[in-house]
């Protein structure tokens, strides 16, 4: 399967906020993937040593680029910066914690590289032989938001809130990202649904961390997600134009 994907064809965007404790391990796993050509680290005003760790990696690894926000703006803002600076044919988001495994990039990028999809979602809820047992109410919240998103966008996915979304670069760079925090997920899903794209899903593993371990999303972000689903699916109806690239 690895041979189906060109080497160094993937830009990995890593939004960071106070992730000094896990960033080095995440980067090691990312850089082991042969398809990774660049890693764009976007520090969103961290108060710990995240920026120092990132700069050290940039100095010793040619594939790593570091960009810093002067103050905290939110995950969506960090992603907006990262997407704008991506240069390779395919783009994926990787959180700076250990909840998702970069070894599964291959599952996301293969359908893009073989021209079977324009966007691929890595779903935590597609059936697998074995699975990690997740928190019940967190799962139900995610599934409710996914259901509401599906009803309003008419795009049937099983995990709208997943971190692992892989894109053709020209697609994600054509989408004007407005949300600064965790509203990015419903916003981008709504806007993708208007673009007449080939969207696929594949199962991925998920290793959730607790709030004590640094998880930052909360109930207010869930309320904002509902607002974003309504706004970007039912109120903002402007079409998004994109031109498919042939430089893969």
Image (cartoon, grey):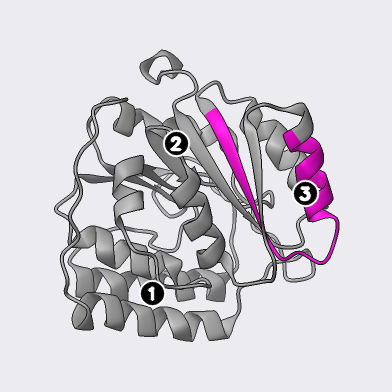
Q: CA distance from mark 1 to mark 3?
A: 28 Å
Asked if 179 appears above or below 10 in the picture, the reply is below
Q: Is residue 55 magenta?
A: yes
Residue 237 tag number:
none
| Residue at the (27%, 25%) spot, across then down | 114
Q: CA distance from mark 2 to mark 3?
A: 26 Å
Across and down, in percent, residue 186 comes to: 37, 69
**Category of crowding for the residue at label 1, using alpha-carbon neighbours closer than 10 angstroms: few (below 14), some (14–19), many (at least 20):** many
Of discs 1 and 3, which sits in the foreground?
A: 3
Residue under label 1: 145
Residue 22 tag number:
3
| Residue at the (67%, 26%) spot, across then down | 62
Viewer-closest of 62 and 193: 62
Of discs 2 and 1, which sits in the foreground?
A: 2
Q: Disc 2 or 1, which lies upstream in sequence?
A: 2
| Residue at the (44%, 63%) spot, across then down | 161
Q: Disc 2 or 3, which lies upstream in sequence?
A: 3
Describe the element under mark 2 as helix, strand or loop. loop
Horizontal side, residue 165 vs residue 247: left or right:
right
Across and down, in percent, residue 158 comes to: 34, 58
User: From where the camera sits, is residue 108 visible?
Assistant: yes
Across and down, in percent, residue 17 comes to: 70, 62
Horizontal side, residue 177 vs residue 78: left or right:
left
Q: Is residue 73 magenta?
A: no
Give the magenta range.
37-58
Residue under label 2: 87
Asked if 196 appears above or below 203 in the picture, the reply is below
Asked if 27 appears above or below 208 in the picture, the reply is above
Horizontal side, residue 90 vs residue 137: left or right:
left
């Amino acid at each position: 399967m690895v041979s189906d994907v060109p080497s160094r064809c993937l830009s990995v965007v890593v939004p960071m906020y106070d992730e000094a404790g896990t960033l080095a391990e995440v980067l090691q796993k990312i850089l082991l993937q042969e398809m990774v050509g660049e890693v764009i680290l976007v520090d969103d005003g961290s108060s710990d040593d995240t920026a120092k760790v990132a700069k050290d990696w940039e100095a010793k690894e040619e594939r790593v680029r570091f960009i810093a926000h002067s103050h905290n703006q939110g995950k969506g803002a960090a992603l907006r910066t990262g997407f704008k600076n991506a240069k390779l044919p395919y783009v994926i988001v990787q959180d700076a914690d250990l909840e998702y495994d970069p070894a599964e990039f291959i599952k996301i990028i293969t359908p893009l590289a073989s021209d079977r999809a324009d966007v691929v979602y890595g779903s935590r809820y597609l059936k697998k032989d074995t699975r990690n047992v997740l928190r019940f109410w967190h799962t139900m919240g995610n599934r409710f938001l996914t259901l509401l998103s599906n009803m309003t966008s008419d795009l049937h996915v099983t995990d709208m809130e997943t971190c692992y979304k892989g894109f053709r670069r020209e697609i994600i760079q054509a989408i004007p990202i407005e949300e600064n925090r965790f509203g990015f997920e419903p916003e981008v899903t709504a806007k993708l649904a208007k673009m007449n794209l080939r969207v696929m899903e594949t199962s991925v593993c998920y290793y959730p961390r607790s709030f004590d371990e640094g998880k930052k999303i909360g109930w207010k972000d869930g309320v904002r997600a509902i607002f974003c689903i309504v706004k970007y699916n039912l109120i903002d109806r402007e079409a998004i134009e994109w031109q498919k690239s042939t430089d893969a």
